[in-house]
């Protein structure tokens, strides 16, 4: 059965961080309502990818939280991952889905170029994620997204929109004029002194804005 991405916090985890700390923190996070967990394509050379992914899957699937891999879609052929997040559009999405051989969640990062939004709509992806809304250390390769771009995207597609890059509980209210389903966060939560408390702060702010 294909899991679905819900609204709210879309958590991105960095597999290059200490695995014991990562998994311990994630175990706390999944007790809360999370839209999805994405494993960032940032593995250390000495990381046993299948073992780490299986551990993440075990924690998340106990709470029916979908797990996506960043870019490495081939892993969906051999592992019980729920989907893939592309940083850019693959050459042949139809052929790619045929190779995977099952229904999966697919999303893509968009910036100010609305052609990516049109592509996602034409190929009926499950969501799009705009990056970067604010300056961010983990999204430093992204240009800042114009708020008008997000508004125009809603005129093009009804696909759920997530916002990412430099978003924190303090600047979240400035996004209140935009129509979106949730936010994607990496270091804002996972690198916080108290990740669980920070997740709850994000959730509270989002609930106040998205009603």
Image (cartoon, grey):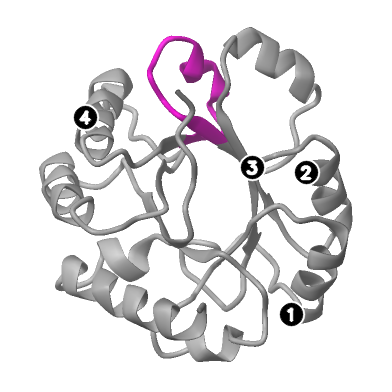
Q: Residues within 10 Å of mark 3 (few under 14, many from 20)?
A: many
Left or right, 211 with respect to 93, comes to: left
Crowding around mark 4 (Cα neighbors within 10 Å: few <14, some 14 to 19, many 20+) is some
Q: Secondary structure at mark 4?
A: helix
**Residue 137 vertical position relative to residue 32 in the rendered view, above or below:** below
* Residue positioned 37% across, 35% down in the render: 43
Residue 70 located within the stretch drawn in magenta: yes
The residue pinned by badge 1 equals 147
Q: Is residue 174 left or right of residue 8?
A: right
Q: Is residue 162 left or right of residue 45?
A: right
The residue depicted at 50 percent of the width and 66 percent of the height is 183
Q: Is residue 31 left or right of residue 71?
A: left
Q: Earlier in the sequence, mark 4 or mark 3?
A: 4
Measuring from the top left, give residue 96's x and y in whole percent: 69, 17
Residue at mark 2: 120
Q: CA distance from mark 1 to mark 3?
A: 21 Å
Earlier in the chain: of badge 4 and badge 1, it is 4
Which residue position holds label 3? 126
Q: Nearer the viewer, mark 1 or mark 3?
A: 3
The spot of residue 88 in percent (x, y) is 71, 41
Q: Earlier in the sequence, mark 1 or mark 2?
A: 2
State the CA–CA distance, disc 2 to disc 3. Answer: 8 Å
Residue interval drawn in magenta: 69-84
Q: Are marks 2 and 3 in contact (CB under 8 Å)?
A: no
In percent of width and height, residue 97 lies at: 67, 18
């Amino acid at each position: 059965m294909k899991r679905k991405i819900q609204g709210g916090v879309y958590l991105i985890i960095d597999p290059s961080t200490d695995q014991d700390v990562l998994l311990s923190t994630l175990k706390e996070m999944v007790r809360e309502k999370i839209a999805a967990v994405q494993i960032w394509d940032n593995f250390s050379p000495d990381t046993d990818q299948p073992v780490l992914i299986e551990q993440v899957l075990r924690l998340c699937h106990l709470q029916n939280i979908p797990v996506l891999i960043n870019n490495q879609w081939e892993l969906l052929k051999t592992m019980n991952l729920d989907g893939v997040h592309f940083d850019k559009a693959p050459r042949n999405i139809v052929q790619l889905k045929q190779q995977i051989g099952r229904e999966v969640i697919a999303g893509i990062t968009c910036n100010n170029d609305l052609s990516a939004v049109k592509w996602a709509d034409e190929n009926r992806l499950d969501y799009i994620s705009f990056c970067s809304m604010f300056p961010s250390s983990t999204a430093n390769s992204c240009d800042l997204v114009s708020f008008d771009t997000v508004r125009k995207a809603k005129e093009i597609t009804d696909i759920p929109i997530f916002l990412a890059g430099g978003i924190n509980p303090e600047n979240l209210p400035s996004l209140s004029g935009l129509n979106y389903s949730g936010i994607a966060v990496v270091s804002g939560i996972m690198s916080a002194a108290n990740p669980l408390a920070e997740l709850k702060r994000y959730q509270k702010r989002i609930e106040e804005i998205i009603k």
